[in-house]
């Protein structure tokens, strides 16, 4: 998924408009999940305790390295990479393992992976630099090297905040969320200025379904360590999942004040504004982003989507056609899909013919998704190409969203397509033993399936 996408879907939901009209609407970015403001739960739950240690664990006193290395690590733990860069700008003639670890950590945090690799290679293969090697390996997802580096530096470095933090990340990658939470909690108790550890606690709580705790912890991160961009983005997603777009926009504004050059907050803001119907402001921001990044494929796609949402389909089509003609443009599949949606929404035989062609062109540059496959089947049927419609319809598989399965099953059954019964069976199986099961079964029963 591109940087512009919003990761807000947490489960299956029914789309009443889709089921009523049996047409495919533009995808909605903000699902209607819960209407309760989870942060009002603070009055009930209070400020949560940090993740506890296991009963048989002993609290370990953690500390920072001495000198400049320790000062740099404090800045890195708080998300302030530039301050760490300044502290470590002057090299040491005989760097200590702590200095090397801080230097590599700084380079990695600044996105300079090649430089970090080169720096370590020049130091030779010495076990005392195990923590530094683990830090670089973590960024490369080389978990064997991560484990080797942490294990060989355990005796000398396990009381350091940074060693514990990367050990916690190792547990996260291994799927050992509870152990990781225990480590991050220990770090925050010993070094409350370590905003990244606090962020990881909030992130873990979100992924474990503890929305109230996650929201509180992430808000604390923004208060203490506003330069940690990931915390703002994660809190934005949490607000969206709680159907609170205005609060999400407020978070993005706060994040933008500390990260004016970061693209993600602006893209998220545009998508949320489109979703809540403020297309004029969304288009204005998209226009500014396009002027700043005229060759960025994600921004160009976002701009075209805004033009469509603002009721300027011809302008959106012109932009998209210009983009797909460029050999180096990397988003052709998405561009052709959007062209298909625009033409389909415009209606009329000529536009429907174009829509079908655009959807099939999208398939030539990728894989036609079930939603688009259903759209092509509908268009072919409207054009009287019944066999082509059935061919496309029969290729809709069980990977389709529940809304697509239901709408396609009902639509196909009304047209005596055999594949409709298979889609209905998949819809029932997908929602079996869920809170949607009875509703889905009732919808299909009413349709005669």
Image (spheres, grey):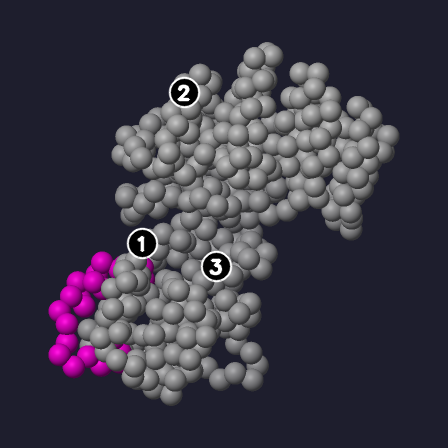
Q: Is residue 221 above or below residue 131?
A: above
Distance from label 3 to label 2 (Cα)? 43 Å
Whether residue 77 sits left or right of residue 174 in the image: it is left
Mark closest to the chain's N terminus, 1 or 2: 1
Residue 383 visible somewhere in the drawing: yes
How dense is the environment of label 2, judged by Cα within 10 Å: few (below 14), some, or many (20 and up)? few
The region drawn magenta spans 78-100
Distance from label 1 to label 2 (Cα)? 39 Å
Q: Quadrant of residue 20?
A: top right
The residue wearing badge 2 is 318
Q: Is residue 396 above or below residue 144?
A: above
The residue wearing badge 1 is 227
Mark closest to the chain's N terminus, 3 or 1: 3
For residue 202, the mark is: 3
Measuring 73% from the left and 34% from the top, which residue is drawn there?
A: 394
Q: Nearer the viewer, mark 1 or mark 2?
A: 2
Mark closest to the chain's N terminus, 3 or 2: 3
Measuring 14% from the left and 76% from the top, which residue is drawn there?
A: 92
Is residue 335 part of the magenta span, yes or no? no
Distance from label 3 to label 1 (Cα)? 16 Å
Whether residue 373 sits left or right of residue 57 in the image: it is right
Q: Is residue 36 above or below residue 206?
A: above
Whether residue 104 sits left or right of residue 1 in the image: it is left
Tell me, yes or no, whether the two marked residues, 1 and 2, touch with CB atoms within 8 Å.
no
Give the SS element for disc 2.
helix
Measuring 43% from the left and 41% from the top, which residue is drawn there?
A: 4
Residue 104 horizontal/vertical position (percent): 28, 69
């Amino acid at each position: 998924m591109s940087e512009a996408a919003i990761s807000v879907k947490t489960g299956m939901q029914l789309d009443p408009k889709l089921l009523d009209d049996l047409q495919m609407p533009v995808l909605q970015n903000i699902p209607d999940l819960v209407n309760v403001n989870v942060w009002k739960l603070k009055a009930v739950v209070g400020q949560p305790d940090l993740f506890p240690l296991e009963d048989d664990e002993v609290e370990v006193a953690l500390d920072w390295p001495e000198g400049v290395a320790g000062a740099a690590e404090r800045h890195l733990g708080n998300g302030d990479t530039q301050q760490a860069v300044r502290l470590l700008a002057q090299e040491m003639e005989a760097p200590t393992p702590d200095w090397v670890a801080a230097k590599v950590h700084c380079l990695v945090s600044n996105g300079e992976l090649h430089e970090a690799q080169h720096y370590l290679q020049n130091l030779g293969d010495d076990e005392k630099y195990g923590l530094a090697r683990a830090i670089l390996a973590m960024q490369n997802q080389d978990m064997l090297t991560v484990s080797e580096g942490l294990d060989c530096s355990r005796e000398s470095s396990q009381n350091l905040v940074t060693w514990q933090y990367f050990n916690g990340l190792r547990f996260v990658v291994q799927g050992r969320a509870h152990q990781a939470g225990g480590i991050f909690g220990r770090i925050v108790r010993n070094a409350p200025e370590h905003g990244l550890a606090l962020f990881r606690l909030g992130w873990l709580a979100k992924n474990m379904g503890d929305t109230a705790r996650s929201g509180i912890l992430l808000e604390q991160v923004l208060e203490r360590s506003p330069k940690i961009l990931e915390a703002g983005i994660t809190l934005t997603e949490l607000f969206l999942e709680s159907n609170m777009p205005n609060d999400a926009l407020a978070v993005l504004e706060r994040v933008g004040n500390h990260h004016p050059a970061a693209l993600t907050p602006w893209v998220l803001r545009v998508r949320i504004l489109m979703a809540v119907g403020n297309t004029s402001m969304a288009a204005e921001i998209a226009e500014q982003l396009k002027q700043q990044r005229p060759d960025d494929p994600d921004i160009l796609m976002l701009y075209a989507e805004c033009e469509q949402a603002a009721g300027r389909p011809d302008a959106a089509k012109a932009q998209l056609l210009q983009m797909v003609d460029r050999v180096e443009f990397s988003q052709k599949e998405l561009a052709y899909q959007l062209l298909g949606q625009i033409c389909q929404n415009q209606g009329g035989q000529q536009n429907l013919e174009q829509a079908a062609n655009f959807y099939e062109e999208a398939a030539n540059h990728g894989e036609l998704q079930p939603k688009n496959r259903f759209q092509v089947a509908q268009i072919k049927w409207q054009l009287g190409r019944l066999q082509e419609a059935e061919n496309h319809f029969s290729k809709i598989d069980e990977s389709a969203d529940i809304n697509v399965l239901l709408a396609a099953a009902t639509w196909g059954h009304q047209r005596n397509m055999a594949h409709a019964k298979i889609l209905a069976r998949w819809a029932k199986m997908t929602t079996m033993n869920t809170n949607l099961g009875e509703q889905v079964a009732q919808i299909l029963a009413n349709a005669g399936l």
